[in-house]
Amino acid sequence: MLSNTEAIATVAVKNLKEAAAFYEDILGLKPKAREGDELISYGTGSTVLNVYRSQFAGTNKATAVCWVVGDRLDAIVETLRSKGVAFEHYDLPGLKREGDVHVGEGMRVAWFKDPDGNILNLVSG
């Protein structure tokens, strides 16, 4: 039923202006559309990421958005770190940590949070 339909990632934030600074200045996303102080839609690859204002921002305790970055993982992690992004470190079965990157089971992944505590990650693919 939905296999040929695009899905849009959606992230709740408390302060849209603060979120815009993070998603645009730190992550380098470009806004595609804005709806006042309520929503910003960003283009990311061939998909869209909606960032919207909500009183429930930051309540998700699982990964909200994942970017598949291939062999650019280490360079992106370094760039984000240089912009002040702190990476999350998790004790996960089958994964070991190499700096801020978790490695194992055929993948390399790094997790970080936006200003509202939404968990985001980069994966080598």
Image (tube, rainbow, N blue to C red):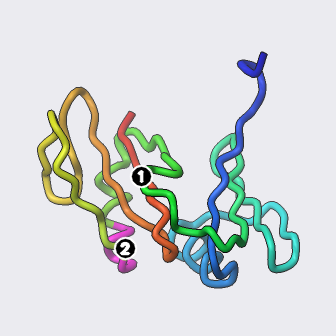
Q: Is residue 116 left or right of residue 10?
A: left
Relative depth, front residue between 23 and 39: 39
Across the whole image, how many numbered discs are drawn on residues? Answer: 2
What residue is drawn where x is 12% and y is 44%? 96
What residue is drawn where x is 52% and y is 68%? 58
* Vertical order, 106 against 32 (above or below): above
Is residue 25 magenta-colored?
no
Query: How busy is the neighbourhood of tag 2: few (under 14 within 10 Å), some, or many (20 plus)?
Result: some
Image quarter for residue 120?
bottom left
Q: Is residue 91 left or right of residue 76?
A: left
Q: Is residue 6 left or right of residue 63?
A: right
For the residue marked with disc 2, what is the amino acid? Val
Give the CA separation, mark 1 to mark 2: 12 Å
Magenta residues, start to end: 79-84
Q: Residue furthest right?
A: 35
Name the residue tied to disc 2: 85
Query: How busy is the neighbourhood of tag 1: few (under 14 within 10 Å), some, or many (20 plus)?
Result: some
Name the residue tied to disc 1: 121
What x and y, as percent, mark residue 32?
80, 61
Image quarter for residue 13?
bottom right
Q: Which mark is residue 65?
A: none
For the residue marked with disc 1, what is the amino acid? Asn
Secondary structure mostly taken by the magenta-highlighted segment of the chain:
helix
What residue is drawn where x is 31% and y is 45%? 109
What residue is drawn where x is 75% and y is 65%? 31
Q: Residue furthest top?
A: 1
> Which image quadrant: the C terminus?
top left
What x and y, as percent, mark residue 43?
71, 53
Q: Is residue 27 left or right of residue 113?
A: right
What x and y, as percent, mark residue 42?
71, 59
Question: Which element carries disc 1, helix, strand or loop?
Answer: strand
